[in-house]
Image (spheres, helix red, strand yellow):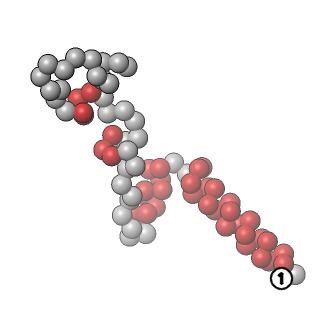
Amino acid sequence: MMEQLVVGLIVALAFAWVAWTILLPAPARDRLRRLAGRPAPPSPAGGCGGGCCGCAAAGPKPAGRRGGSCGSH
């Protein structure tokens, strides 16, 4: 009986972790964190929202430099 309870608890925790990390969209997780009184975590990619910020976010190019990473894609 006790083993079934422990296994059920482990399965429930695993399902909750999968639902929180994979199934729940990031805006919903952030909102739930704010409702719980915790700040939302910072974006892992900086201020670009997880994507490419483009060449403008890299700042101005030095004078005389040609090519570079922004012109290559």
Image quadrant where residue 50 sits: top left
Asked if 65 appears above or below 43 in the picture, the reply is above
Residue 56, image x, y percentages: 23, 29
Residue 23, image x, y percentages: 60, 49
Residue 19, image x, y percentages: 62, 55
Q: Nearer the viewer, residue 8 or 57?
A: 57
Total numbered badges shown on the rendered structure? 1
Q: Nearer the viewer, residue 1 or 72?
A: 72
Q: Nearer the viewer, residue 69 or 17?
A: 69
Instruction: Please tell me whether mark 1 sits on a helix, a strand or a loop.
Output: helix
Q: Residue at x 73, y 69 (%)?
A: 10
Q: Residue at x 43, y 56 (%)?
A: 30
Look at label 1 and name its amino acid.
Met
Q: Residue at x 32, y 24 (%)?
A: 69
Q: Nearer the viewer, residue 63 or 22?
A: 63
Q: Quadrant of the N terminus?
A: bottom right
Report the residue marked by disc 1: 2
Q: Quadrant of the C terminus?
A: top left
